[in-house]
Each structure stands twice: as C-alpha cells, then as structure tokens.
C-alpha cells in the first residue's frame, strides 16, 4: 500500500509542475484566455490522475493473483514408434493452480510425425523429429522421436507335423490331433481340418476326430499352402458292457470310528460305466457314502455291496472296538529352560487308530516347573524336575533343568533346509533356531543385500523378485549368518521341432529348440541315453550310429524334453516300431515300483505312507497311462497319466483345508506347480454343498473365481495354490470408510483454497 501511495503522489506532483509551467507560457501568449484554459487543464489533469490511479490499482491486483507456470510433467511416453502408430501425450501443467494453463505442441519434421493441439502424435514416415511442448511463462520441454518402418513381415508355413495319432478307431471313439506348424514364427499358424467322408468320421476346428460309422476316410490338416493327411480306418464298436467288478484292495476288518475308501474298477477296463453305487446292509455297524468311503460306527458285521451297470460285488465287513497304543514319541523338546520360560510338548501316539489317545502330563517337582493338561511347561525356579508323559499304560519322561534367568549370549544360529535357487515370483520361509534356546537376545532379524533381486520379511519369508544373486543376512544378538540365494526365471516348456526322428545309419538330423518364456535359461544341454545307437553333440546335432532306438534328453537344468530316435538300415513304417515305455535311466523308488508291478488301471495308495508322488512315479504314470488314487482319509486325490503335462513337478499328497468366515480354504501342493490336471474329492459335507471355487492370486492380492471346477465336493484343477470353496458368490469390493472421509476432507480443502485464491463466489 505504501508503494501505491508513493507512486500516486509522484504522479500528481509531476503533473502539477508540468501543468503550472504550461499555464504560465499560455498566459504569456494569450492573457485573455489564461484563466479559462487553466481551469479546463486542471479538470483534465484531475481526471487523468484518477485514471492512472485506477490502472495502478488494477496492475498491482493482477500481479498479486497471477500464478506463473514453473514446470511441465509428461506421463510415460514412447520415444520410438512405427509408421502408422499413434500415441497421446499426457501433459500436466505445474503448479496445478497456474493462471495460464494453455499448452502448445510442435513437431520439427511434420513429414516424419505430426502432433495436434491435443498432444496426439501420428507417425508418418521413417526418420527423426523433435517434439516440443510449450506452456506460458517460457516453460517448455522437448524430446527426440524416432519413427521406424513396420517390423511385421509375412512368414509362410514351411512344414506341418501331425505328431502322434491313431490310424484306427472304433465307432464312438475320439482323438485329438496335435499339429505343429513350422517354422514356429510363421505369420498364420491357423490349421484347418477336413474329412473326406464325414459319415465315417468328422473333425472339428480344434482337430478333434469323432468316429461315426464303420469305413475309411482321409483326414487332412492344412495351414497356409501346406497340408498333410492320413487314412483313418473306423472299426465297429466294441462290446462295452460291464462283466465284472474288481473291488481292489480293501480291509475286511475295521475299528470303531475308522474309515476306508473303496476304489473298485470295472472289467473290462474300457467298459461303459455310468458310476458305482454303494450300499451297506447294516448301517448301524457301518455306513458307506456315494464316494465309496466306509465309516465304522459300532462293533458287529455289515455286508457292503458295490454295483455298476447291474453287476454286483459284495463282502462282509467286521467292525471291532479297542486298539491299544503301541508307541509314543515325545517329539522335539527343550531339556534346559530359564526361570519364567514356557514350552509346549507335542507328543505323537502310534498307531494312529488307537482307541485311547488321551495323554496325561506330570512334573515330579512343581516348585521347579509345572505342566498343564495341554503339555505346556512353565519354569518357576532354579533346580531339576522330571516331566512324565503317559498314554494308555505307556510312559515316557525326561529330566528338565531350570537355570537362572540371566543374560546368556547367542552362540550360534542354525538354519534349516532351504532352496538356494528360487524362481521369480516364488516364496520360501526360512526355519531358523537360535542357540542356545535360552539366550537373552533370541530375536532374529533378516535383511537382503539386494532387495531388487529378493526380499525377506521379519518372519524370514523370502520372495524372489527378478533374476540375479543376493545374500540374505540372518542376525541374532552378535551372531550373523549369511545364505546365498539365486533367482531364476521359471521355464514353462522346451519346444522341439521333432519329438521323434527316423534315421538311417550315419545319417544326421539337427534339433531346433526354443525355451519359453524367452527370459528363462536358454542354455540347453543334449544327452543321448544310448550313444551306441545315436549320439548328439552340444549343438543338438544327432548322428545315427547303429540300428535300434535311443532317447535324446534336452534340458536347461530346470525342465527337460525327450526326442525318440529310431535308427534302421532301411525305411520302415512307424507302426512297426515299438517305443520303450519308460526311460531306463530314470530314477526309481518304492512308489514307482508299486505302480510298475500293478496290473490294475487304478493304483491306490495311502497318504500316510507316501508324502509325495515322485518324479519317477509321475513319469511312469505318464508313460503307462495308469491312474493313481491317493487316500487322504478325509479326501481323495486322483491323477491320470494321460493328464500329466510335466512330471518334473512333484505332487504333495497332503491337502490343507480350514474353515474361514467366507468358506473352506484349501492349500494344494504347498502352492507349487502341479504336474497336470488332478481331481480332489472331499468327504466334508460343507465342501460337498459348495458351488463356487476361487483361486488366490498372490500378485493381485485377491481371490479370482474358477468356473465349472467344482461339482459334488470334487474339484478339478491344474494349478497349485490356495483355494476357497463357498456356497455363495463372493464380492471382494471393500469400501474403506476412513479413506472416504480422508478423500472428502481433501476435496473440501482444495475447494476452499480455490475459492480463497480466485475470489469468485458470492459468499466471499
């Protein structure tokens, strides 16, 4: 205000002096008009002074309210484009309340690329241009844009590989062709299928052939200008009636409260079977549900009947009462404790079917340490006592020493088994023990030397982020342990140009392989199982040595594929070749031997006997096309050899499930990848009533629905992870009231600032 009044004063003074001088001169020249002219000039000067004052007020007021542009923020944009491509620049003028927010766009070479008034860039021809973004107050930003020619070029089909297929089918049978289009990067890889006689057999757009009537037809697959065909012979339909029922392995004696699962099979194996029907003739002694699970209720006998397509098979079940405990294991426990410390005993009782499993606990000196009915020990004072654990006449004990509760330093850190190599996106939790267990500072701290490669939280859970190597530090007290972690990209598959090769002696064939995804380990190793028949070098070049059959293994250390090589002196038809069912060098184990020695299509095992289905067992199932059934007491896992896609993925037989507020939460295969499609049938009524299945997506941190994957308590899945089964559809849209309040508050605050700044509202 002082400045304003000072300027006004000076202006008036100057005008006054000027006017006075002018009046004096004028009066000298025209004395008669002096008085009148002086009055008029004074009035004009007064008006001019008032106008100048108003202009100064307006100018000062504009300078006070005008907010300059300080910067331009350009959202993510591309500096490389292809001819014909478009992109829209998202430009923000800063500050957000700047007075002049107009933005102008320029292109230095509009023949290369143009940009309109909205910031939309259109690439016209190959070259380089400079894009300029200009705002008020001299603020501008610019970048160079390179326009390239379109990369797309048409790649024609050079060859078709029909893969394995059946040249003979029976009426009603189906088969799916697996056609490979070469090269792999061909532009148009779509395949069209035709049948020369659709009355004999039809083929759909996916390559699925359906045999309709007896006769012959030619099946043709065409891609681009290439086509391949074969003659399909359709035979009469087999007699598919059920003639007998094989009950498989079952127990004729059960204890009260025990359950068992029947796994019958029809004879012949390919007979049409709409399903089995189970009946108990004495439901007071034992019942059997629609899945074939028998539950023993009271002592006595009951006849169990199994029926399929009018054929019946039965056996007499004897139910008995008590089973004595034979053994007890105390599990892991501490023999030394500090005053005030607590520990929980976790003993186990064998057999698990024992009737009396009630465990009792006792301390011989409760002043030193006491133990409650749940096995929780609490140390009270320095000294020694004996802890006694009893069940069904069996007793086990150990001496417990209680020491002073003083500061004992950490001496060592024991790290349990962990995986040194992890795949991107996978997690593992470290098992860490501080020694001694009574050390003062037993708090464990974790840190990653490169969190961009892998992170670790306060509980010791490591999460792989991207490829690379890092070190995880584990610290307790003054002791630090380090473990090295290497993160790799998971390999999904190895694609080979041929899965079988027929060669003559001394003839060669070059394998062409690709690893997917491209960022996975691309270094491949080639190995011949029988180099006396066919050998392979480090580049995948196969050389036929002698007549016979050999298997070539292609691997990148994480996944492998096989190529079968047939070497003969003269060309023979593939139908005359008998390929080996199982890789002879593949490791075997007890489960594999059980499957191998079984003559049945279905092989039943108990979860308690096998904690996992091994790679070897999966490989044998894959080759033999047998079915493996895992009896988990409360659930049944079924995996078909024909549904296995990767036998490198071990199948964990334990399925965890717990009740939550939304439904039943199920953890399958410890969240690891499955070998293929598996089915899990549950004996839990809650799951049998459920109609909806959700899979938890860890990257998005939410459940996603899986359609048509659950029916009558059975789920069919091909992805390991955490699932949720519910009777109702869930809505995962959650509104945070606190965040809404914060948002409203911010909106009101911004509106108030705007009103105060602009002064445009009546209530101002």
Image (cartoon, helix red, strand yellow):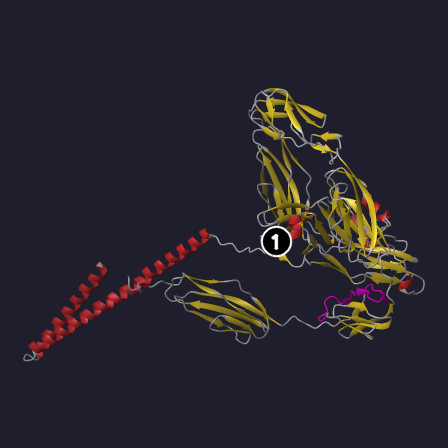
For mark 1, give the secondary structure: loop
Q: Is residue 544 above or below residue 423?
A: below
Relative side of 183 to 151, left or right:
right
Please state the horizontal and vertical placement of residue 588, each as a whole percent of the image: 83, 45
* Residue 32 falls within the magenta-colored stretch: no
Please state the horizontal and vertical placement of residue 355, each as a whole percent of the image: 72, 33
Residue nearest the viewer, comparing 89 with 301: 301
Q: Which residues are magenta?
A: 163-188
- The outermost residue toward the right is 569
Q: Which residue is mark 1?
A: 727
Please give the name of the residue rendered at 71% of the width and 47% of the height, measured from the top-left corner. Answer: 635
Quadrant of the frame with the C terminus: bottom left
Relative side of 9 to 450, left or right:
left
* Residue 525 appears in the rendering: no
Snapshot quadrant of residue 227: bottom right
* Residue 164 falls within the magenta-colored stretch: yes
Relative side of 549 to 39, left or right:
right
Relative side of 432 to 190, left or right:
left
Please give the name of the residue rendered at 64% of the width and 55% of the height, measured from the top-left corner. Answer: 691
Residue nearest the viewer, comparing 541 with 162: 162
Residue nearest the viewer, comparing 649 with 376: 376
Main SS of residues in magenta:
loop
Q: Is residue 758 above or below residue 266?
A: below
Please state the horizontal and vertical placement of residue 131, each as a whole percent of the image: 50, 69
Mark 1 nearby-residue class (10 Å; few <14, some 14–19, many ≥20): some
* Residue 612 appears in the rendering: yes
Q: How many marks?
A: 1
Quadrant of the frame with the N terminus: bottom left
Please give the name of the residue rendered at 66% of the width and 71% of the height, measured from the top-left corner. Answer: 152
């Amino acid at each position: 205000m002082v400045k304003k009044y000072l300027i006004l004063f000076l202006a008036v003074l100057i005008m006054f002096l000027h006017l006075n001088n002018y009046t004096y001169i004028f009066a000298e020249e025209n004395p008669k008009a002096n008085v009148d002219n002086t009055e008029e000039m004074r009035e004009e000067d007064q008006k001019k002074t008032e106008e100048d004052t108003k202009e100064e007020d307006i100018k000062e007021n504009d300078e006070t309210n005008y907010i300059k542009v300080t910067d331009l923020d350009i959202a993510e944009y591309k500096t490389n484009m292809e001819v014909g491509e478009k992109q829209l620049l998202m430009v923000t003028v800063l500050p957000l309340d700047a007075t002049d927010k107009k933005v102008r766009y320029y292109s230095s070479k509009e023949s290369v690329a143009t940009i309109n008034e909205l910031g939309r860039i259109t690439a016209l021809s190959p070259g380089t241009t400079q894009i300029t973004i200009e705002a008020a107050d001299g603020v501008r930003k610019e970048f160079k844009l390179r326009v390239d020619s379109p990369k797309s070029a048409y790649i024609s089909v050079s060859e078709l590989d029909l893969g394995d297929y059946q040249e003979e089918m029976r009426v009603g049978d189906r088969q799916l062709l697996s056609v490979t289009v070469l090269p792999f990067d061909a532009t148009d890889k779509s395949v069209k299928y035709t049948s020369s006689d659709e009355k004999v057999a039809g083929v759909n757009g996916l390559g699925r052939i359906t045999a309709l009537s007896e006769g012959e037809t030619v099946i043709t697959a065409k891609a681009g200008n290439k086509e391949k065909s074969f003659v399909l012979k359709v035979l009469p339909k087999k007699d598919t009636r059920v003639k007998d029922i094989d009950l498989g392995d079952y127990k004729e004696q059960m204890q009260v409260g025990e359950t068992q699962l029947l796994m019958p099979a029809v004879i012949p194996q390919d007979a049409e079977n709409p399903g089995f029907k189970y009946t108990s003739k004495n439901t007071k002694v034992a019942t059997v549900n629609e899945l074939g699970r028998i539950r023993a209720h009271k002592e006595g006998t009951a006849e169990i009947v199994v029926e399929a397509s009018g054929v019946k098979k039965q056996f007499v079940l004897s139910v008995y009462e008590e089973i004595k405990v034979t053994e007890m294991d105390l599990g892991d426990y501490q023999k030394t404790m500090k005053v005030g410390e607590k520990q929980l005993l976790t003993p186990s009782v064998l057999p698990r079917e024992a009737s009396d499993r009630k465990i009792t606990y006792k301390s011989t000196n409760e002043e030193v340490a006491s133990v409650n009915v749940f096995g929780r020990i609490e140390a009270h004072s320095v000294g020694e006592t004996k802890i006694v654990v009893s069940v069904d006449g069996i007793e086990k004990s150990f001496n417990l020493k209680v020491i002073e509760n003083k500061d004992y330093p950490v001496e060592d850190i024991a790290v349990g088994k962990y995986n040194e190599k992890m795949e991107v996106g996978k997690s593992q939790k470290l098992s860490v023990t501080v020694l001694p267990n009574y050390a003062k500072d037993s708090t464990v701290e974790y840190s990653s030397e490169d969190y961009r490669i892998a992170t670790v939280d306060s509980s010791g859970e490591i999460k792989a982020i991207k490829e690379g190597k890092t070190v995880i530090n584990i610290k307790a007290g003054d002791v630090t342990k380090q473990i090295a972690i290497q993160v790799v990209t998971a390999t999904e598959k190895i694609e080979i140009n041929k899965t079988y090769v027929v060669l003559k002696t001394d003839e060669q064939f070059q394998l062409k392989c690709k690893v997917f995804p491209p960022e996975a380990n691309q270094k491949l190793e080639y190995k011949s199982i029988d180099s006396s028949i066919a050998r392979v070098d480090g580049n995948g070049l196969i050389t036929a040595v002698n007549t016979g059959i050999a298997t070539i293994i292609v691997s990148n250390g994480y996944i492998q594929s096989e190529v079968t090589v047939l070497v003969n002196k003269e060309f023979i038809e593939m139908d005359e070749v008998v390929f080996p069912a199982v890789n002879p060098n593949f490791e075997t184990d007890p489960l594999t031997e059980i499957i191998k020695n079984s003559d049945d299509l279905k092989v039943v095992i108990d979860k308690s006997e096998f904690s996992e289905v091994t790679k070897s067992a999966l490989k044998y199932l894959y080759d033999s096309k047998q079915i493996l059934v895992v009896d988990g007491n409360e659930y049944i896992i079924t995996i078909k050899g024909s549904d296995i896609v990767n036998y490198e993925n071990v199948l964990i037989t334990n399925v965890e499930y717990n009740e939550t507020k939304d439904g039943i939460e199920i953890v399958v295969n410890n969240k690891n990848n499955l070998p293929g499609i598996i089915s899990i049938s549950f004996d839990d009524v809650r799951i049998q009533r459920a109609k909806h299945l959700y899979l938890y997506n860890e990257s998005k941190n939410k459940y996603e629905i899986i359609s048509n994957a659950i029916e009558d308590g059975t789920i069919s899945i091909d992805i390991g992870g955490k699932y949720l089964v519910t009777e109702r559809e869930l809505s995962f849209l959650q509104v945070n009231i606190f965040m809404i309040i914060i948002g409203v508050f911010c909106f009101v605050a911004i509106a108030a600032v705007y009103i105060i700044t602009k002064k445009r509202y009546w209530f101002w």
